Amino acid sequence: MKIRNGIKVFLPFIVLATAVALVFYLVTSKPERKQPELKEKVWQVDVIEASRQTLSPDITLYGRVESPEQLQAAAPGAGIVETVRVRTGDKVLQGQTLLTLDQRDFNSLKVQANSELSDIQSQIEELKIRQRSNKASLETEQELLRLAEAEVERMRQLKNQNLGSATTLSEARSVLGRQQLSLQNRQLEVDSFPARLRMLEARLINVRTRLGDAERMIERSEVTAAFDAVISSVPVSVGDRVAIGQTLITLYPVDSLEIRAHIPATYVADIQVALKRGDTPEASLTINKQQFIVDLKRLAGEAEATGTDAYFHTGELSRELRPGTLLPLRLSLPPTKEVIPVPFQAIYGNSRIYLLRNGRLQGIDVETFGQFYQSNGDALLLIKSEEIVDGENIVITHLPNAVTGLKVKKID
């Protein structure tokens, strides 16, 4: 009985110990699994060999067509528009009539000026005749004065000799005084002749000027083309009343158009040096699938922080252009030494590339100098850096996760 009771007490412990031993055996007897080895990923890339060269970079500009010689024909005076013979965009020849104003508005000014001119000319002629008469009369007045003086002297002598009366002497003196006054008036007429003549001549010049103005107004009331031109705008219509100086027609010479484009500050210094040497940088543009060459003639007088405006002469190409047109230009810059041409996909950001060194990427910063176009038309970017050695491999595959130290492999 005691043995059974002992077995009942120790049996659970025996079972538990057996289970623990069995678990321990299973765990310790489990075969070991090898941990997988982590391998670094290798990215395959294309490369080119660095080769320093002397090349002429190109930059792309966006220009606007303008006319520095745009002419605005203005109304010579207040009047009515009588005819308009052209419209915006018309091409006209030198001497062609474009617009006329009603000349009756200006003829009255000419008639009035002619009338005043005739009146002043008559006054001048009359003044000259009177001057000749006054000079002749002056001699007579002087002779009469001498006679009056002699009469007074004679009467004085007679009175002193008691042969004449005081009344007679007084009358002689009165006649002398009147003659002196008459002579002075006549002398004044003669002496004032130059001044009065100048006054009339000044009025004559003024009237002649007004007459010339009236004749020019009549002449300009018919607007004609001063050169072969293109009509830019016609802001008036038949019947409009216009004021003096109001614009009637705007036109520009057919060969005067220029293209204004903004050149970044990086390239301005090289262009200035080329212009001083007498070199003329050229730019190419394409219109209707046809390529044209335009010359850079000058830089703007004022610069901005971002660069300077440049003006390109279009020559015969002007006939195909219109002011306000926006055009892309490809400007050829002076040759640059020791630049390396690379595809655009080799550039990260604006100025960073990666070299393949010892199987890993090595990032370096570079300076860009514009584009270079190959014979097949493909564009390359010109870069320069002292850290690049000729013959080094430049990675041209654009990797989104590119970073210095990334393991890569050149594609065979």
Image: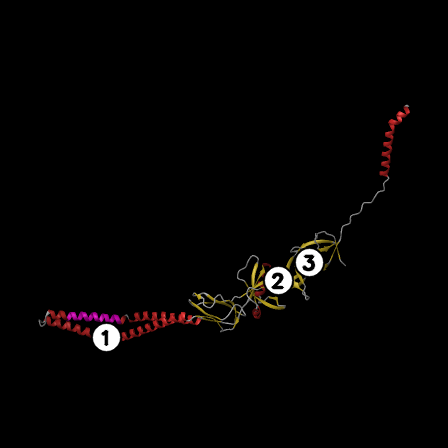
Image x and y of residue 86, in percent: 50, 70
Q: CA distance from mark 1 to mark 2?
A: 92 Å
Task: Inspect the image, locate mark 3, and give the three-letter code of the amino acid beneath it.
Answer: Gln
Res. 148 visible in picture: yes
Q: Nearer the viewer, residue 398 or 387?
A: 398
Secondary structure predominantly adopted by residues drawn in magenta: helix
Res. 279 visible in picture: no
Mark 1 vs 3, N-terminal side:
1
Q: Are marks 1 and 3 in contact (CB under 8 Å)?
A: no
Provide the residue designation for mark 1.
137
Task: Inspect the image, locate mark 1, and give the three-letter code of the amino acid beneath it.
Answer: Ser
Image x and y of residue 321, in percent: 57, 67
Range drawn in magenta: 172-189
Left or right, residue 129 beside residue 389:
left
Provide the residue designation for mark 3.
345
**What's the colour scheme?**
secondary structure
